[in-house]
Image: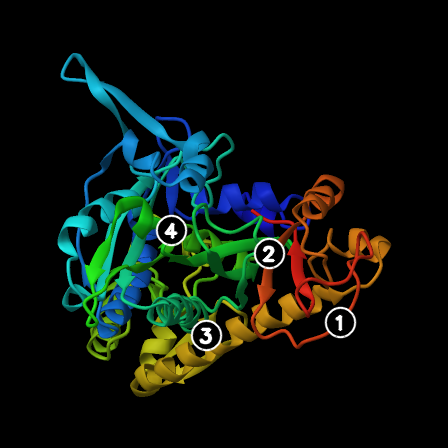
């Protein structure tokens, strides 16, 4: 039970459960400056797993890592009006340095479209300089009023990709390609199902022509925007004069994109899979895939620990991330609880009788135990880890689908959106979106790419649907 680990049950207070579990599972701690966080080694290892897989896929698609400055002249933000208006409330600005007032204030990077656009203006002269396919791993600062560990902090880690292309077609292909990469990693590594879709005009990124998103459902029925990919058209190119001479000798503006994936994905993993015992981590990202807990008394200690160490070495040689918990000061029961809290997919229990029988007990974080012969543990675990991932994904997908409803009346909308996602028709008018948010606290999450075409009238105002299909609404983080 949750109380055994000092966790508030999800059904009692999901928000409190989340705050407790990320702290007690040793993922993160509060920083000394309001709204900041310290990502601890166990949490950072999760980020490194996501980072490795994303970075590999970026490079496979021709992208190169670079780095741009943390400080951005405020004048850069004035060049694209919609962009500056969107970010103005969140900017942290440096006005003094070296004991003197700066000639021009500097924004602490909230995102890098402006500074990269400035550099591209001098780098791009010909069609031969295109495409530019850049990515950077960095931190950004957005001065949030209401913060939540991993999900919304004043500083967070992410990657931000930025590309420039000679044609609209290439840029739009890039925008979709990167969303597909994000969706693949979220499904195949984080076991997080979601909807790929396009944001409405009211919800798109400031300065974008349009924004694509991946919207996942947490276990309290709320949505989490897990990543975004933006098509800018020529907006930033015109603002920063990113021009090139094309093959026809005509001077043209480039088409640009940007796309980002941040440490809020760790929050998505916690809230998609966790239960009242704590975390449940997807095996492909779990820093520890299996923990060995030896069980012994003083007279059997040496024998059991020797067997446990041999088993750990065999599993390491098989490419499995294993940890041997040989701490004498804690009981096996304490260790079981701790590793359940930390979400390790599998636990191997090894006592003196197991050593004599050349077996071990394999316990799954999703439930169930089996006794496995010692020589079969490595191949059994390899299969079990894959099965665990599939079970975790199907569990999350089943929960999402069971908490998603198609509705046609506003009364049904208001009732169901308190419990999960709603698919409904909408008129597309920003004022109607604002009224829905004011009356229900729900927002449009996306226009799903795979939703079938359909006709209907706006669930709130009754005007004809603007999208030719139902769109997704939910309360969101």
Residue 257, image x, y percentages: 35, 59
Return the residue nearer the eye: 288 or 31: 31
Separation of residues labelled 3 and 4 (CA atoms): 42 Å
Say how the picture is coloured: rainbow
Pair 3/4: label in front: 4
Location of residue 318 by image quarter: bottom left
Mark 3 touches mark 4? (CB < 8 Å):
no
Residue 475, image x, y percentages: 65, 49
Left or right, residue 305 beside residue 295: left
Return the residue nearer the eye: 8 or 213: 213
Mark 2 touches mark 1? (CB < 8 Å):
no
Q: Which comes sooner in the sequence, label 3 or label 1?
A: 3
Separation of residues labelled 2 and 1 (CA atoms): 19 Å
Residue drawn at (67%, 76%) of the image: 453
Q: Which comes sooner in the sequence, label 4 or label 2?
A: 4
Secondary structure found at label 2: strand
Pair 1/4: label in front: 4
Mark 4 touches mark 2? (CB < 8 Å):
no
């Amino acid at each position: 039970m949750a109380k055994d680990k000092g966790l508030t049950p999800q059904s009692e207070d999901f928000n409190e459960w989340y705050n407790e579990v990320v702290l007690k599972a040793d993922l993160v701690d509060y920083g000394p400056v309001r709204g900041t966080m310290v990502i601890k080694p166990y949490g950072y290892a999760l980020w490194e797993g996501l980072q490795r897989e994303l970075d590999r896929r970026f490079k496979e698609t021709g992208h190169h890592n670079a780095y741009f400055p943390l400080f951005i002249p405020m004048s850069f933000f004035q060049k694209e009006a919609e962009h500056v208006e969107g970010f103005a409330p969140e900017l942290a600005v440096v006005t003094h340095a070296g004991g003197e007032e700066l000639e021009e204030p500097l924004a602490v990077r909230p995102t890098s479209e402006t500074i990269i656009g400035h550099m591209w203006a001098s780098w791009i002269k010909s069609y031969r300089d295109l495409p530019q396919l850049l990515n950077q791993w960095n931190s950004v600062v957005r001065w949030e009023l209401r913060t939540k560990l991993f999900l919304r902090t004043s500083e967070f880690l992410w990657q931000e990709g930025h590309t420039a292309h000679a044609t609209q077609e290439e840029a739009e292909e890039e925008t979709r390609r990167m969303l597909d990469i994000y969706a693949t990693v979220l499904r195949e590594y984080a076991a997080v199902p979601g909807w790929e879709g396009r944001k409405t005009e009211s919800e798109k990124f400031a300065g974008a022509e349009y924004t694509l998103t991946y919207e996942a459902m947490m276990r309290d029925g709320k949505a989490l925007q897990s990543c975004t990919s933006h098509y800018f058209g020529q907006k930033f190119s015109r603002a920063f004069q990113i021009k090139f001479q094309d093959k026809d000798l005509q001077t043209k503006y480039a088409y640009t994109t940007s796309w980002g994936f941040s440490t809020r994905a760790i929050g998505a993993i916690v809230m998609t899979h966790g239960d009242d015992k704590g975390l449940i981590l997807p095996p492909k990202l779990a820093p520890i895939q299996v923990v060995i807990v030896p069980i012994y008394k003083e007279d059997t200690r040496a024998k059991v620990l020797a067997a446990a160490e041999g088993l750990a070495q065999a599993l390491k040689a098989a490419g499995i991330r294993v940890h041997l918990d040989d701490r004498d000061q804690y009981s096996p029961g304490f260790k079981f609880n701790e590793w359940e809290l930390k979400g390790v997919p599998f636990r191997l229990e090894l006592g003196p009788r197991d050593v004599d029988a050349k077996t071990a007990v394999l316990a799954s974080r999703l439930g169930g135990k089996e006794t496995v012969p010692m020589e079969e543990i490595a191949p059994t675990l390899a299969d079990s880890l894959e099965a665990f991932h599939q079970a975790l994904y199907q569990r999350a997908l089943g929960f999402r689908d069971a908490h998603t409803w198609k509705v046609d009346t506003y009364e049904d909308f208001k009732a169901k959106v308190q419990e999960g996602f709603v698919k409904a028709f909408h008129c597309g008018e920003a004022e109607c979106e604002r009224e829905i948010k004011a009356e229900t606290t729900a927002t449009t999450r996306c226009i799903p790419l795979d939703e079938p075409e359909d006709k209907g009238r706006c669930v709130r105002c009754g005007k004809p649907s603007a999208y030719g299909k139902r769109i997704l609404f939910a309360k969101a983080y």
